Image (cartoon, coloured by chain):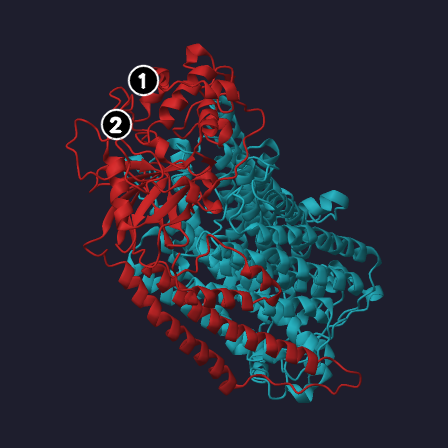
Chain colours: A cyan, B red
Amino acid sequence: MATVAASPTYAGTAGTPRTGIMDWLTTVDHKKIGTLYLHTALFFFVVGGVEAIIMRAQLMGPNGKLVSAEVFNQLFTMHGTTMVFLVIMPLSAAFFNFLIPLQIGARDVAFPRLNAFSYWIYLFGGLFITIPIFFNAAPDGGWFAYTPLTGRQYSPGQNLNFWVLGIQILGISSLAAAFNFATTIINLRAPGMHLMRMPMFTWMSFVVQWLIILAFPVITIALFFMQFDRFFGTNFYTVSAGADPLLWQHLFWIFGHPEVYILVLPAFGLVSEVLPTYSRKPLFGYAVVAYSGILIGFLGFGVWAHHMFAAGMGPIADTVFGVTTMLIAIPTGVKIFNWIFTMWGGSIRFTTAMKFAIALIAMFTIGGISGITHASPPSDMQQTDTYYIVAHFHYVLYGGAIMGIFAGIYHYFPKWYGRKMNETLGTWHFWLNFIAFNLTFFPMHYAGMLGMPRRIYTYDAGQGWELFNMISSIGAFLMAPAFLIFLWNFFRSKKVGEIAGDNPWDAATLEWSIPSPPPEYNFAQIPMVTSRYPLWDLTHPERMADVPHSSEGWDEAKRRTGEHVTKGGRHEADVAPMHIESERKSAKELGIPMPNPTIKPLWVAAGILVLFSSLPVMYAGKHAIAFMMMAVGGSMFLGFLYAWLTTPLEDAH
Amino acid sequence: MTRTARPRHHSAIALAATLPLLLAACSGQYPNSTFTDLTDLNRDSTSLWNLMIWLGIGVFVIVELLLVFVMIRYRRRPNDAEPEHVHGNTKLELTWTILPAVILVIIAVPTVKSIWRFQSGAPANALQVDVIGHQWWWEFRYPEQNIITANELYLPTGRPVNFTLRSQDVIHSFWIPQLGGKRDVVNNRTNHLWFTPDSVGTRAFNGSCNEFCGASHANMRFRAYTVSPEEFDRWVAGQQATAIFPAAPAPAPASGAPTAATPVAAQTPPPAPVAAWVFPADQLPSHVVPTTPIPAGLTFAEDVLAAGDAQRGFEQYSRSLCIGCHRIRGNPSSLGVIGPDLTHIGSRHTVGAGLFPNDARHLALWIKNARKMKPMSLAAASMPTIGIGEFDPLLKTSVTAALGGLTDQQIADIVAYLMSLK
């Protein structure tokens, strides 16, 4: 905290509250940044969904003529890229932002301005990679962009430039955010919240931050190679200069497989919050669920080559990666059973959030089982690059990640906006979505095992695929109304939803102890944490007596705060500082120093965008303009970064 | 069609059992099903699938039943007591850690056996076939037989075949779903795939490219014909022969050969007097007959086509752009190696890499404007637009005589010539 060096000139002026659009452009509040992430990701969800629906319309029958081959290739490339980098990761980031500080009893993330920067660079990267599709110039090399097809020789257009640069920009966002959240979780936990007391969402998020920190540098390097090949004529992937095309594949999947866990673990964390709450029981086998998350993270780095069983790596590699891939099923299966036994013996309320969480268990199981069938390389040779794989990873990423995120949205909406989402509309959304999801993706198992390759814009009649494609397309068309119901519910409930109160679901973790929506400072008084389920300590302390890690924490709390805390002497304010909205005090009144809003991170991100945008201009041969853009972007980046770094985070206090 | 139905049957049931709704659908005809017992490789992958899918269905049923039970039994009722706060159960948790591990060992053992069986080199007596992937067609070479052909593969039954896979441009993936798993075709690497079509008679199969390879990835198809060793020898004899034009009157074909025999070249020492053979067109099952529609706006007058003269076509072909890319053994001017070998193009059943039936009309349209018939890119070496007045969708310009364009009549002549190259 920059309390010592703060110059008085900054004080006061920077703290002026802003309103309207400037409030959003300058915010460094983790909750508002979470909101920005949420809305932007929902926007890109619509974009990616429309891309998918056009594809399904094309494939509805044989010899489809709706779009051309080149448009179709852009559609599936952008559908995959959008859903992975612009939808699921940012939706997870929305929850990281909103929830992690609330769950660990902190007032913000460790680096609030870096957090704002992460968002802006994500938005810019997302637009950079998405806008070309409106000009028929979108990336068309598939989301894993295998070289040499994506090299300059075979893809001379600008299309792939937007992909390689866009993913690079988005990587900056992910890495900055990951360092931020890892630091936040390590350093900003409230007194008494040791690791084994962290809510499971924060646990899974913690694992994910490390996956991002370790996996994204690999794709960054791989992309730099590709970038240099395409723009500066190097030969990292040039096969005519002797390059081995498998270099890209290995680098991509060393990133790409952990990426799968980056996508699903946050959703696992969310359902691990939802299931106990609506079952009124603690998470079954908390420690095992946490450890299995860590184990999935570790093993996730040792299975990448199972994406390449058909590439001809040889029997030793096939054997090793086949076996490690099977191993990863064990911790995943453990999670499934722990969730079911969390519900076992409970008192289950079937709210919309709970329905989505249960759907995750049911659907992810199917994705896991089909995953085993291609962990075996000889079997995978019949499955890889067919529609069976498309079915599999949609059961993992839609049935897993998206279902979990929907559960999270319905569950945390009241905390986020102070109002509940409409349960009737939620039920409609759930069932329509559940049916449409299965109609769309289950038949793809059949199409794939009956010989249909993926990424084809057309297929011949009489191949035995017509029925399955027809059903898939109908399912995809049904997904649109399901999602529209959700959007309607989401935006309407913000205004007219039932007032939620602090803890509408009778949940147990810290974020539910504060008002909804939370005040800017989150906690008027930093809570002292004495158990995994602090709020249930209050409602039924007798049940919590034997909870592991729930008593020894008192000593820790004592040590950290230097206060005298006795087990019998806790009172409500220690654990759950409740607030009444009318009496809510501002941070200033409470004397809580809050970071000042600033627009500098936005400008730094804009500088990076201009820098990267100069490369396609250069590629088009306009060197003078490109050089100018580099100069402008570079000075924006350096200038605003300097201003940012020399401005204290908060007013002197 | 003699094949035992058992393993395939099992797989179909296993697949169908996962969703009874679609059971009815599974009684239909699936010409590209991956569940066959036609080759040793496919028997391995099918038996592994059977093992895994039954175990998987077991796990699925247990998980979903448990879930449904929990949902019904423990749904909230009015006046529910506060549930017991159970935090875990070591024995249970050990059970569902160890049990999956045991299941995985059961899967891993046959998996590893199969990996080593099929990746330790093909049997010594295997037929060698070189597969070369191009954007967007397949080149097949039989180095021992000295045959080069395109998009149509002939495999003798009962003998292992060892594919040597290489790529000319980008990564492709070679797959005949009914005969065995796929293997990528990777630049600067030589991959191998072998299997033995040992439980199959004379049949036709579809093959496809499975690694996204650009604009016409979907149109990079091929055909594979499993034939008896005797038919294979006759096919080899026909393909080895040099195309001679004008065609000499064919020697009387052996009984049962439904297509015209290829004359044996005068300059090659006459091999065993076997009549050439190709997979009979009238026995092609419907799933290997392409249904790709002809793009709108592309026509060829029937009367012009019918008036095509092979002799004129031979002369025209021999002084056109064609010879720069295509080779016809026996035509001394046609020496190109970029495009498919056309020596016996008249004996093939498809044109455009499995995209259209190889008849005079489709071949004429293909020559007239291939880039409209099949999406291509300027980055790949692709068949140019030949028909005068045709708009080239890639060059965004119309073809003229000065650019090497040909009239419909000239194209019809060339078609007559090419179709005579049986």
Snapshot quadrant of residue A89: bottom right
Answer with left or right where residue A312 lies relative to residue A175.
left
Residue pointed to by mark 2: B329
Mark 2 in CB contact with mark 1 (< 8 angstroms): no
Give the residue drawn at x 68%, y 50%. A477
| Type of amino acid at the residue the image marks with label 2 | Arg
Rendering coords of residue B258 (x, y %) = 36, 39
Marks 2 and 1 belong to one chain = yes
Residue pointed to by mark 1: B318
Give the residue drawn at x 76%, y 61%. A428
Q: Nearer the viewer, residue A303 or A149?
A: A149
Rendering coords of residue B247 (x, y %) = 29, 24
Snapshot quadrant of residue B25: bottom right
Residue A568 visible here: no
Give the residue drawn at x 41%, y 78%. B102
Compared to residue A479, the image places residue A205 above or below, namely: below
